[in-house]
Image: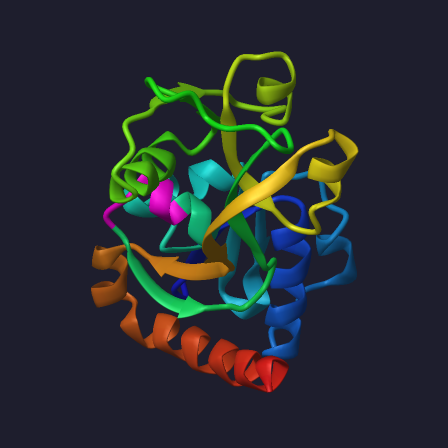
């Protein structure tokens, strides 16, 4: 039986752009692959198995070895700090992490509150600024926090900025640019180095063409 490379991928925008990259790199993924509702999809002809997961779970699957490699946003990588290697910046799903809040407002002088689903990233950023803040972890609808008085600021992903505008918020500081990265389990990288290096080489050519 030929060796199988297992790839963990998030659903949604990253999935669509990653599948497009893989096809441009010469991998034959059938049309129905895009529409499948299965969580595990095997493409025997290419020696690939895909696990479709929540974006925040991809590094966990890779770290624990149930997936050899994965595609994850840099925001998730910074927040999760998993024991994986980052092999390639795929230059897809570009966005950035930013500090936002209501316009023309100042943060409280004493322990200002920051709402975010990125508590580690947010805490590190404000610590670097020399500011002591209270982090409030939220899992969704982060924009609500300043509006209802839960927090002075939010730290969240910004793509077009439309969501901030629609909720009457403004961007105050840009923290870090985010793109999707190809990550690998350290053990898999040793055992399946030929397959993984081939994948990286093929994707690298496509990415360099896309960027240029």
Is residue 51 in view?
no
Which is nearer the eye, 68 or 85?
Answer: 85
The image position of residue 93, as x and y in percent, is: 61, 58
Please state the total of marks drawn on the protein image.
0
Q: Residue at x 51, y 61 (%)?
A: 48
Which is nearer the eye, 66 or 86?
Answer: 86
> Is 71 rendered above or below residue 78?
below
Residue 20 found in image quarter: bottom right
Specify whether 70 is left or right of 17.
left
Quadrant where the N terminus sits is: bottom left
Which is nearer the eye, 80 or 205?
Answer: 80
Is residue 67 in view?
yes
Residue 211 found in image quarter: bottom right
Is 29 contained in the magenta span? no
Specify whether 8 is left or right of 193.
right
Specify whether 124 is left or right of 148.
left
Q: Residue at x 65, y 72 (%)?
A: 23
> Is 150 rendered above or below residue 99?
above
The image position of residue 194, as x and y in percent, is: 32, 76
Is 80 contained in the magenta span? yes
Q: Residue at x 21, y 66 (%)?
A: 190
- Which residues, given as a range, are shown in magenta? 77-83
What scheme was used to colour the molecule? rainbow
The image position of residue 36, as x and y in percent, is: 72, 45
> Is 23 rendered above or below residue 37?
below
> Is 116 rendered above or below residue 31?
above
Residue 27 found in image quarter: bottom right
Quadrant where the C terminus sits is: bottom right
The image position of residue 43, as x and y in percent, is: 59, 59
């Amino acid at each position: 039986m030929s060796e199988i490379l297992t790839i963990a991928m998030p659903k949604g925008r990253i999935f669509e752009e990653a599948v497009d990259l893989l096809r441009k790199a010469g991998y034959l993924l059938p049309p129905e692959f895009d529409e499948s509702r299965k969580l595990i999809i095997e493409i025997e002809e290419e020696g690939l198995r895909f696990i479709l997961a929540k974006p925040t779970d991809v590094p966990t699957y890779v770290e624990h070895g149930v997936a050899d490699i994965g595609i994850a946003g840099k925001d998730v990588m910074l927040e999760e700090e998993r024991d994986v290697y980052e092999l390639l910046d795929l230059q897809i799903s570009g966005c950035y992490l930013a500090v936002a809040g209501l316009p023309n407002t100042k943060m409280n002088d004493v322990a200002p509150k920051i709402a975010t689903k990125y508590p580690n990233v947010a805490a590190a950023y404000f610590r670097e600024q020399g500011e002591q803040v209270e982090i409030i972890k939220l899992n969704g609808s982060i924009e609500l926090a300043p509006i209802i008085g839960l927090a002075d600021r939010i730290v969240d992903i910004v793509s077009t900025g439309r969501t901030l505008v629609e909720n009457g918020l403004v961007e105050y500081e840009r923290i870090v640019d985010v793109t999707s990265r190809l990550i690998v389990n350290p053990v898999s990288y040793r055992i399946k180095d030929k397959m993984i290096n081939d994948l990286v080489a093929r994707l690298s050519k496509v990415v360099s063409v896309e960027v240029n």
